[in-house]
Amino acid sequence: MTTESKTLTRELLAEFLGTCVLILIGAGVVAQTVLSKGANGGQVTINIAWGLGVVMGCYVSAGVSGAHLNQALSIALAVHRGIPWRKVVQYSLAQTLGAFVAAAIVFVTYHEAFAAFDGGVRQVLGPQGTAGIFATYPQAFLSTFPGGVIDQVVGTAILVGVIFGISDARHGVPSGLGPVVVGLLVVAIGMSFGFNAGYAINPARDFGPRLFTAVAGWGAEVFRAGNAWWWVPIVAPIVGGTLGGWLYDACLRER
Amino acid sequence: MTTESKTLTRELLAEFLGTCVLILIGAGVVAQTVLSKGANGGQVTINIAWGLGVVMGCYVSAGVSGAHLNQALSIALAVHRGIPWRKVVQYSLAQTLGAFVAAAIVFVTYHEAFAAFDGGVRQVLGPQGTAGIFATYPQAFLSTFPGGVIDQVVGTAILVGVIFGISDARHGVPSGLGPVVVGLLVVAIGMSFGFNAGYAINPARDFGPRLFTAVAGWGAEVFRAGNAWWWVPIVAPIVGGTLGGWLYDACLRER
Amino acid sequence: MTTESKTLTRELLAEFLGTCVLILIGAGVVAQTVLSKGANGGQVTINIAWGLGVVMGCYVSAGVSGAHLNQALSIALAVHRGIPWRKVVQYSLAQTLGAFVAAAIVFVTYHEAFAAFDGGVRQVLGPQGTAGIFATYPQAFLSTFPGGVIDQVVGTAILVGVIFGISDARHGVPSGLGPVVVGLLVVAIGMSFGFNAGYAINPARDFGPRLFTAVAGWGAEVFRAGNAWWWVPIVAPIVGGTLGGWLYDACLRER
Amino acid sequence: MTTESKTLTRELLAEFLGTCVLILIGAGVVAQTVLSKGANGGQVTINIAWGLGVVMGCYVSAGVSGAHLNQALSIALAVHRGIPWRKVVQYSLAQTLGAFVAAAIVFVTYHEAFAAFDGGVRQVLGPQGTAGIFATYPQAFLSTFPGGVIDQVVGTAILVGVIFGISDARHGVPSGLGPVVVGLLVVAIGMSFGFNAGYAINPARDFGPRLFTAVAGWGAEVFRAGNAWWWVPIVAPIVGGTLGGWLYDACLRER
């Protein structure tokens, strides 16, 4: 391989591994909470662990690929910071694949716990539903449009806008600690903008594991549930991330 | 524009954006907790998220405006550190506007959740009251004076006094991590001095969102409730912040 | 004043202010939890806020006095690091006074909440007891000796031993972040060694506020309760701190 | 002693002391939670305190021995980073001894609380079982193989793989703060992969305290319980740690 293609391969492996670690922790904490019926987890551990998932995902990728781990961020960086669109496509695939593989590992690790919980009959929603361990589903009161779209646009705008702030050299975050601060941001968003629809705010985080559930026993219902919710956490975060980055730059970027 | 007015504009945008992010997270976490009836949040997430709101608000403003995000701090810095009073007035408006806009965004994002919670009938207090998502209201046992005033003076004195300590070079906090430490301070105050009246300790944080509720369906009751509580989290934090800064300087400032 | 006495005065003011902030947060969180009957606090917030109290106490004193805030640490530093004993005595008084004043401020701030909770009849222990907001009392099953003494010796040995590690240059903690790490240590001890007797592990933290309760309405019972428990969190932490420091040095100090 | 043997002695003392501190906090938090019947602890404090135990264990050893505190990490470093196998054996003994001693200290400190809890009749499992304070036991639904082995392989692979990332200079973690980040990693794993079998992911952490319970009153049942579970948290973490390190290097190591 040329040096260039070697570099690219390693970047894609970093995005793959980083998103894999993110979803291992993230799907893991929801699995632990749901399957233990709340005995071994709850809202606090879910919010904290998703934040820590981001922290740990960054620490296996930041120095190599920049730790996007999220198409909404990759695209915002393409629009506002000029990273090449070709890289967005490549990263995007690596991210989704990492999330898919992580969902599979969580499922295998908790395989016997799943069986004990639902007797082997996989259900998407309801009291014995377990698809929400992997992907997000909206509350019953939430409309897809405008409710769900607004929810994901706002959440992702906060995510990407504040990440632009955290990585702005004027604020002086030591680069080796940026992942911890971004993790705290995800904790904050989860505690504040998680009620409507579980704060996907990341296409790969939602679509990769959803695809896994579709093929691993939950079936096509995962794409129909919540009034075909699945496309919202893909499309709306891309809009929101681009908007959040624009807002930050419009207000504060040095020109 | 001249360079000077460009700089000022950017500073005001930073205060606007920072306070907006603070209230997005802060009002967001209370909305999530109240509207989910405690299923998706509670005292721990409220205390942590308000602290994180400060952290994130700082990371979109610190390097530009100094991240006051609070008139009580701006005024203490004018009294004890000599920043110009004209700037206090300008920052003050930007902070209040940022808080107002954030309240509106939280309301829009959770619009359908509000409707599911109260059937569209906005109430200030009581079991279906939701005004406390945006602004603070005192406990029934608390007198406005002296109880409420003492509460806000003490809370804000701790806030500003310890911020003076955190930003004192002798203690060596890396400037890029100051926001995290200040966020921890807000977590601490919320866990310790939040029971009487919800630890506003910040005029903008309280008045901006309260104004929003007044015009967005809760009506003038938001200014009458709690024995016309609204002015306490404006006036008393200013007194407390100035006092706290004075105490720190009186004890420890190098002369 | 000579420069020397000016320096000493400022050091004592730093110890006073630092311990005051520690107890403001620490007594504050227990007050909030007890007086709200658990609605606004619990075990998690108590453990976290006591740790944050240490963090914040350090950030108003570390660069001036070294932030002992605890006689057990001052004495261990005299025994193992050679700070002068005269300073131990001076610091000790400043620490105790700071804790006393902080207890008074917490009491004043929550004065109306106390009245709403117990109708103005101050009780030490029992369902309406509130003395535990300020000082520690042992569980019913705990003997004073050996149970209580072991508890405080072990807890303080861990505290001081690990602080020696945190401040050991070989471990490389940035000095401006040492307070955060020490705060995490206090969180850890509170979660692990807090059940027997409330982890005083600090004479000033316990005696100053206990003295306040004795004169502020709870009476001499605060010295009789728990089989005259009051001396244990004074004497045993001093033994434990000295032991912990010795253990660290015996194992790891470079010679 | 020669300088070399002096250095080795100090390294072994560091591993001993570090693992001792880890288990003091870790066994302590479970003791506090179980013996207080959940009044003074719960899932959140258990997850946080085990993470903090690692942090504090590192701060009494990192600069001297490298703070392995875990054979799974020592072995992964031998396989992938070339530390000598002789050192693995020596560290391994020091780690296990440290964990054993810590278990004894926790038992002594909570001796009267144990008596109040179970009347002096030590039981391994069941409602009055207390062996789980010290060592891990699997859920009833979990098979030893493959379920338990997969659980420990996956958990330890995440632990060691991400530690390889955290200590990779490209990610820029300041070395003095590495322990805090590793502690957060342990918090994350505990929240996500703790349900099946209590996330031992460390032979010394599990075997040392289990041995203590065997000789301190719980008897040989601690080796029979859970279908002779005891060997799984010894063997599987070694496999998982080696695998996790390999995965990180295979994906990201510079060649």
Image (cartoon, coloured by chain):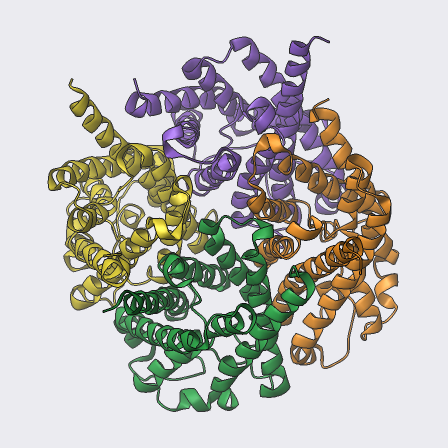
Chain colours: A yellow, B green, C orange, D purple
Q: Within the image, what quadrant is residue B113 found in?
A: bottom left
Vertical side of A219 occupied by A226: above or below: below
Position of the C terminus of chain B, as image quadrant, is bottom right
Residue depicted at x 82% and y 49%:
C87
In front here: A114 or D206?
A: D206
Horizontal arrangement in the rendering, residue D82 relative to residue B166 (left or right)? left
- Dividing the image into 4 quarters, which one contains the N terminus of chain B? bottom left
Residue at 66 percent of width and 28 percent of height: D17
Q: Is residue B52 shown left or right of residue A245? A: right
Outermost residue, left direction? Answer: A86
Q: Can residue D116 be seen at all in this image of the molecule?
A: yes
Residue D206 is situated, as x and y percent measured from the top left of the image, at 57, 28
Q: Is residue C108 above or below residue D55?
A: below
Q: Where is residue B57 in the image (x, y as percent from the top left)?
A: 39, 61
**Residue A115 in sight here:** no
Q: Quadrant of residue B241?
A: bottom right
Q: Which of A212 and C113 is in front in this view?
A: C113
Q: Position of residue D151 (x, y in %)?
A: 41, 30
Q: Residue at x 81, y 44 (%)?
A: C75
- The quarter holding residue A2 reads top left
